[in-house]
Image: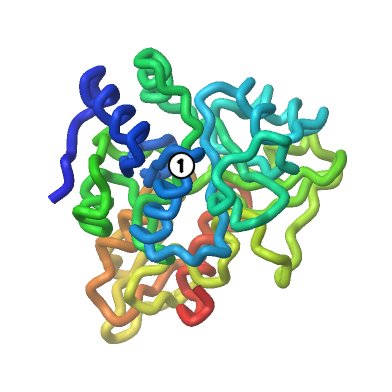
Amino acid sequence: MPDIQKISEESVAKAADILKSGGLVALPTETVYGLAAFALDDEAVARVYNAKGRPSHNPLIVHIFRPADAKNWAQVNDLAETLMAHFWPGPLTIVLPKSGKAVSQAAGADLDTVAIRCPDISWTKAMLAVGFSGPLVMPSANRSGHVSPTTAGHVAYDLGDKVDMILDGGTCPNGIESTVLKIEDNHAVLLRPGAIPTDAFAPFISDLRLVKSDAHISAPGMLKSHYAPKAKVRLNATDKRNGEAFLAFGPTDIEAEFNLSDTGNLAEAARNLYHALRLLDNVDCIAVAPIPMHGLGEAINDRLNRAAADKKNR
């Protein structure tokens, strides 16, 4: 079993030492648990790909501890700077052209862009206090393509001894990954809906574009099959069939094994989504009730569509 420790000054200092020496540490964020490695260490980054069984063409997000550090790794234009000022620290990933100073080439899957975010979580300040300032690559701490982890137990179940240490910060408050925007000149493309609803960008982006379905993978979460349990997933279900577990949303007359939110609250549903998919992954098929497409429903439906996709597309 991996070394699991509650967050404290001592455990964060130990985690920083492991990362500096090329090890892997699972860390909680406001979205999901991430599998962290020092982003400047090629061998450590390669260990992340190997531990997850992650395809090498799927790039990693670079996590920084201070918003100002973005300019060390990316070419930050006015639009990116505005978004960073309003949404960082927080669950927004921005894809930008690389600067002259580069992180591990493997982390960027040989692209000329870098995906970067500044998480809103307490351990970043604690690591800075012990003299470690990153940056980190930190994809979700699970097997590639599987349901993302929102608790330390999920990480231990998926990765076991492949991770040197797990910092246990409890259940992740958002429960769904960051929103990913690619900045192209003064335009923005939505690569992945996430914990920040798309309409929150309206005051800053007048023409937010949607990524084309056949676009080249330039950020995590763009694989057609992803976030998937072993069970089949049937979407927009209005009935429950033999052998199915029913995943409800809001008030329902159907006997449900789990309800993402009894009251139809999308934030609660997002927080519960991955826990529910893991909990019900002991049947042939999970039937999921319709989820509205507004607000966080866009991100929830994105994850469910990828969970229901043909697993050969991972």
For residue 201, above or below residue 251: above
Q: Residue furthest top?
A: 129
The quadrant where residue 75 appears: top right
- Residue at 23 percent across and 21 percent down: it is 8
Residue underneath mark 1: 41
Could one spot residue 87 in this view of the protein?
A: yes
237 or 227, which lies in front?
A: 227
Name the colouring of the figure.
rainbow
Report x, y in % for residue 228: 41, 68
Alpha-carbon neighbours of circle 1 within 10 Å: few (<14), some, or many (≥20)? Answer: many
- Residue at 26 percent across and 59 percent down: it is 158
- Residue at 41 percent across and 75 percent down: it is 233
For residue 194, above or below residue 20: below
Is disc 1 placed on a helix, strand or loop? loop
109 or 266, which lies in front?
A: 109
Left or right of 3? Residue 163 is right
294 or 139, which lies in front?
A: 139
> Which three-letter amino acid code belongs to the residue tagged 1?
Asp
For residue 103, above or below residue 148: above
